[in-house]
Amino acid sequence: MNLNAFFLKSFRVLLLPFALLYGAIVWLRNYLFDKQILKSATFNFPLICIGNVAVGGTGKSPMVEYLIRLLHSRYQVATLSRGYKRKTKGYVLADSNTTAIEIGDEPMQFHTKFPNVHVAVGEERIVAIPMLLQDAPNTDVIILDDAFQHRTVQAGYNILLTEYSNLFTQDYFLPTGDLRDMRASYKRAQVIVVTKCPADITTEQKNTIIKSISPLPHQKVYFATIQYGIPYHIYTQVQQPINETHEILLVCGIANPKPLKQYLHEHASTYYQLDFSDHHIFNIDDLNEIQKKFAAIDSENKYMLTTEKDAVRLYKFKEELANIPLFVLPIEHKILFNEAAAFEADIIAFVASFQQTPTN
């Protein structure tokens, strides 16, 4: 542990009284929902919720994309997100003129990659769901992004994500830990996915984690690792594999960049980094810093790399970045232990149980 990490951990421990207060508030809220004093709405419609009980990057967006790829050839899929850090309010359905400023970076990423999918945002899911179904009546299934803790809507199928290196079973409430919900809330999920696992995780390690989670009889636990694709140019889509001769400037504003940095450490000659906060909205000062940092790299075999989430927020600087080879690194979840088929079959069965006619 480096010195900065030590002081940060020590400082968070000092905030324990605030964590206890926060935990009490979360417990009370869940108690009121459990006793139906606060009401949850249900819909006779397939709603699949992707979420977590902790803040930080557990891989929700790649999981939404995993489900889109799984379902979109069979059904008309829609996604509904909050639209974090967007400049609009209320319900918005993306169209051909929509920008990341209007719906947020992650929904814009879905909209760009999957143009045939209805992408909507709305802070109040209970209000946004009927509006989405009215605007897109051919929708067969809605994927709720980051909605596990929003109990005003009760989804029929909940996929809870927890990160391998920061399991919710070993975490504590904010601000001492990263939990934004109770550990016991995992019981509401049908499926738990342990994300960002080492690709070579052993069966023994798998079983130890399952034991620590202690899933209920009806719950299934899966394990996933990060799988990076081939970087593609942000504007031309031309692919450029990373190799040991490349010097890379990494520009990213994501919650947990550690796996990405490890990947570059293993595959590139050298990488430099410009870190920004999660969902950071890039401005002209950031652009100048990026250009200056890139120009300072003394190599002819250099390029700039960013994530798909960051790319939608950098796209507005198309003219300014025209002379910089700016590439985007795609990311996917890969289900381990040959269990992808079982994971996917249950999801398809859930949607099919509503006896809807698949879209051709």
Image (cartoon, rainbow, N blue to C red):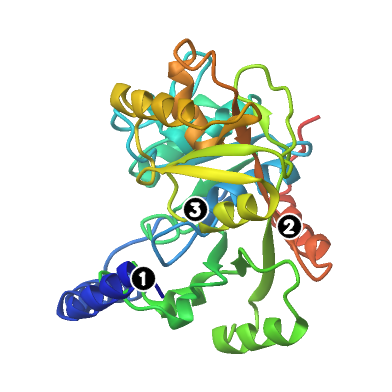
First reached walking from the N terminus: tag 2 or tag 3: 3
Which numbered dot is residue 91? Answer: none
Q: Secondary structure at mark 3?
A: loop
Q: Quadrant of residue 78?
A: top right
The crowd level at tag 3 (other Cα within 10 Å; few <14, some 14-19, many 20+) is some
Q: Height in image: 179 above or below 84? A: below
**Quarter of the image that includes the N terminus:** bottom left
* x 73%, y 66%: residue: 199
Q: Disc 2 vs disc 3: which is toward the camera?
A: 3
Left or right: residue 339 compared with residue 115: right
Q: Amino acid at mark 1?
A: Leu
Q: Amino acid at mark 3?
A: Pro
Which numbered dot is residue 257? Answer: 3
* x 47%, y 10%: residue: 319
Q: Which residue is mark 2?
A: 334
Which numbered dot is residue 179? Answer: 1
Q: Nearer the viewer, residue 87 or 258?
A: 258
